Amino acid sequence: MSVRDAVFPAGRHDLYVKQTYSAAIRSGDLLFVSGHVGSRDDGSPEPEFEAQVRLAFANLQATLQAAGCGFDDIVDVTTFHTDPEKQFASVMKVKGEIFHEAPYPNWTAVGVTWLAGFDFEIKVIARIPA
């Protein structure tokens, strides 16, 4: 079995060690990114929903950058929402600011009942640029 090539964003490695998972795993030219939430540096949730979504995308961006990727390299997105109907407009607003032109990545949104104190989580698969 090959060794996992883990990727961690700068300054947040201790949070991943504490929770015993990697921010992302590089496999060939693909990057499989764990779910990212709108957590502050200490791991606590950003309380306001739209700010939590923005912070989740910022945390995701830090992990992508650590692997030499950006939002344009994302090919597949899965998001998790604790109240999709109520949250949809805010998520679409932020999504539109980040993915503002076609072709857009694949996107699957899932309603869930629990996200460990968070209301939004995003995980992606990205292609690592050559």
Image (tube, rainbow, N blue to C red):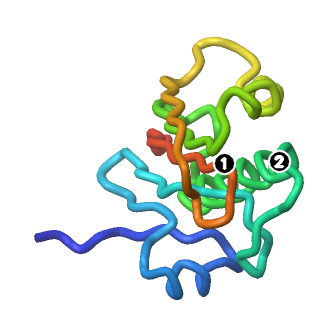
Residue 124 to residue 84: above or below:
below
- Taking the spot 68% from the left edge, 59% from the top edge, the residue there is 118
User: Measured from the top left, where is residue 109 in percent x and y?
Assistant: 53, 31
- Asked whether the residues under the numbered discs 2 and 1 touch, taking CB atoms below 8 Å apart as contact, a structural biologist would say yes
For disc 1, the marked residue is: 120
Q: Secondary structure at mark 1?
A: strand
For disc 2, the marked residue is: 49
Q: Which mark is residue 112?
A: none
Q: Residues within 10 Å of mark 1 (few under 14, many from 20)?
A: many
User: Residue 130 lies in what quarter of the image?
Assistant: top left
* Quarter of the picture holding the N terminus: bottom left
Q: Residue at the left extreme?
A: 1
Disc 2 to disc 1, C-alpha distance: 8 Å
Q: Residues within 10 Å of mark 2 (few under 14, many from 20)?
A: some
Going from N to C along the chain, the mark reached first, 2 or 1, is 2
User: Residue 80 lies in what quarter of the image?
Assistant: top right
Q: Which amino acid does the dot numbered 2 rest on?
A: Phe
- Taking the spot 53% from the left edge, 55% from the top edge, the residue there is 35
Residue 31 to residue 14: above or below:
above
- Taking the spot 46% from the left edge, 32% from the top edge, the residue there is 76
Q: Residue at the top extreme?
A: 102
Q: Nearer the viewer, residue 113 or 3?
A: 113
Q: Nearer the viewer, residue 66 or 112?
A: 112
Q: Please give left or right for residue 115 compared with residue 25 in the image.
A: right
Q: Please give left or right for residue 129 compared with residue 63 in the image.
A: left
Q: Which amino acid does the dot numbered 1 rest on?
A: Phe
Residue 42 to residue 130: above or below:
below
User: Measured from the top left, where is residue 70 in percent x and y?
Assistant: 64, 43
